Amino acid sequence: MNKYRSLYNTTLSLIINLLLVMGCFILCRVIFLIENLKAFSDLTAGRIWRMFEGGFLFDTSAILYTNLLYIFLMLIPLHYKENAVYQKITKGIFVTTNLIVIIMNLMDTVYFQYTHRRTTASVFSEFKNEGNLGGIIGTELVNHWYLTLFAIAFGYVLFKLYRKPKPVKVDRLPLYYGVHLLTLALGVYLCIGGMRGGFTGMVRPITISNANKYVDRPMETGIVLNTPFSIFRTFGKTSFAIPQYFDKEKMEALYTPVHMPADSVQFRPLNVVVFILESFSKENSGFLNEELDNGTYKGYMPFLDSLMAEGLTFKHSFSNGMKSIDGMPSVLSGIPMFIEPFFLTPSSLNTVSSIGGELGKKGYYTAFFHGADNGSMGFEAFARTAGYTHYFGRTEYNEANPDNKDFDGHWGIWDEKFFQFFGNTLSGFQQPFAAALFSLSSHHPFAVPAEYEGVFPKGNKPIRQCIGYTDNALKLFFEKVSKEPWYKNTLFVFTADHTNSPERPEYETESGLFSVPVVFYQPGSDLKGFRKDVIAQQIDIMPTVLGYLGYDKPFVSFGCDLLNTPAEDTYAVNYINGIYQFFKGDYLLQFDGRNTVAMYAFKTDKLLEHNLLGQVDVQQSMEDELKAIIQQYMIRMNNDELVVK
């Protein structure tokens, strides 16, 4: 066996040494928890175990990021790496880099007490102009002397327990290089999967917001995360810099996202069901495009169009982002996407509410549904953060439908099957309930089940038949639930997460790329109308739902209550390629953060061909209002003020 030692010598040492670091990270988490125990309430052994279980995922990622150079040096197919000098160098790199990140963990054990969150890359800009850091750190070293001793102990452990590859003689070079090339290839694959937090294309690289999946309160993410990971995953991300457009008094006079209930409000406990329909852009609607093709355009979602005719919808309605991960916080929590997706920023650890979170205060049973793998896209983590206490994904579907063959082969459970599961599950909930579902079948690669191939119009884009398929799934859902006793006591809301595959020129503009339906429907109610004078957006959904129910508590949402806001005061905001967009009245204003760069009469100039910059009287008032919205957003993101405390 020893004559083949050179084939696995360095690889075995690498694995053992990485496991040594993992042990150190776990001990750091124990120290963190003990030091900050007073900050956490209602911790049980089961919850702590779940947090440590989630922590293993983030520790793995951080350890691999930290040790990329070391791993490469240990796996590189080069027989000279077996000599003693080379191994002394690699040991020095290993001990130094890992001791640095362990010290970062220990320092954050103290800093957490002030910030109540793991330190992110923003710390470097936050303190870059501070000249007293040395004194502050020195004071804390004295106050927390035992953490200094822990740091010394960790350094000693890393140095003494480091496994050095045993000296070997390499005398079978072809075999040696062949095996080590394969080992390197396998190592690259495992490192990529470990750093991403998964090996499938359906799993986005994990970010700090994914820690919310393992906790009940946002602050508990400090237990799940580790500081190196939080810094690595936010490094280079654009932070939310607070602009100084106005003083606080003028800013709040121009705009505030805090919604206060009316004095005479009367709450009515309707159920609430929100559908976020993947890629259901306005272009797919015949109802919303009555002028197209000389009035003959039928679109690709006839059932949703029929609900628009029976409910309340809007001619001019917009998304607040361009990705699925933008849609969920916009629709459920009234948070638009500015600069970068909320999920991917340090602010994702802020305390956040939602329709479900607010109604949970009224005793509602709250749940979120998505047919993909649990954890996909970070939806489960955000749902828990925002107050949807129960989550139903592919795991729960498979448990309810053992041995099913309903996986689409790409993303998750086919919409028709999952919508039926959604209906069955809703009927088992205690009323009142607030539930939301995010569909998935109308997503690339734009396939439909074999039995539906050729059933729905394909149009000129592959997505069209998928829109038809999901629309039909929605129809079958309503055929099912319309017989349930809770149906007429339910407010249904429909919108898309974003647009997709625009075909007509007016839907390829900076306006059209955000055009999605916003629909409210309560069976048998007077909630009806096709409003052409109102501008609606995804972030209006939360305040509109709560206003319709007569919710009697203050909350934060960047949108407005469409039922109680004058048409001329409604608006929409979004962000595209460094430009803020502000729709109000007849105009679209585009703003680069400093200056207005364009004004369009978007309702009539559908292709946005005529820039009216400097020619419209309302330009300055629109710019001021947008500035106030941006400033409020940045302040609240940085100061963790997304809920009323």
Image (cartoon, rainbow, N blue to C red):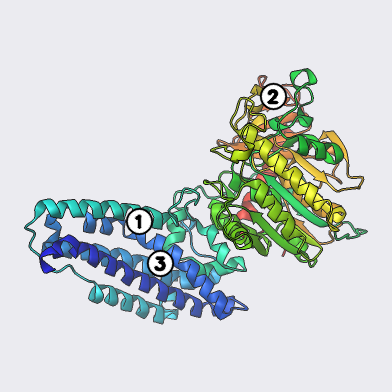
The crowd level at tag 3 (other Cα within 10 Å; few <14, some 14-19, many 20+) is some
In the image, 226 versus 599, the foreground residue is: 226
Which residue lies at the image location 43% right of the left edge and 53% below the top edge? 199
Q: Look at mark 2 in the image and give the residue it sits on.
A: 614
Q: Earlier in the sequence, mark 3 or mark 1?
A: 3
Q: Is residue 575 above or below residue 188?
A: above
Direction top: furthest residue: 294
Q: Secondary structure at mark 3?
A: helix
Direction bottom: furthest residue: 146
Question: How far across and down, in percent of the image, does residue 390 sit?
Answer: 67, 64
Which residue lies at the image location 80% right of the left edge and 47% below the top edge? 479
Q: Look at mark 3 in the image and give the residue it sits on.
A: 104
Q: Amino acid at mark 2?
A: Gly
Q: Look at mark 1 in the image and give the residue it sits on.
A: 190
Q: Earlier in the sequence, mark 2 or mark 1?
A: 1
The crowd level at tag 1 (other Cα within 10 Å; few <14, some 14-19, many 20+) is some
Q: Secondary structure at mark 1?
A: helix
Question: How far across and down, in percent of the image, does residue 203 sit?
Answer: 49, 52
Question: How far across and down, in percent of the image, does residue 113 sit?
Answer: 54, 72
Tell which tag, 2 or 1, sits nearer the viewer. Answer: 1
In the image, 600 versus 458, the foreground residue is: 458
Badge 2 vs badge 3, beta-carbon distance below 8 Å = no
- Quadrant where the N terminus is found in the figure: bottom left
- In space, the residues marked 3 and 1 are separated at their CA atoms by 25 Å
Residue 214 is at least partly visible in this image? yes
Badge 2 vs badge 1, beta-carbon distance below 8 Å = no
- In space, the residues marked 2 and 3 are separated at their CA atoms by 52 Å
- In space, the residues marked 2 and 1 are separated at their CA atoms by 56 Å
Q: Is residue 426 above or below residue 153?
A: above
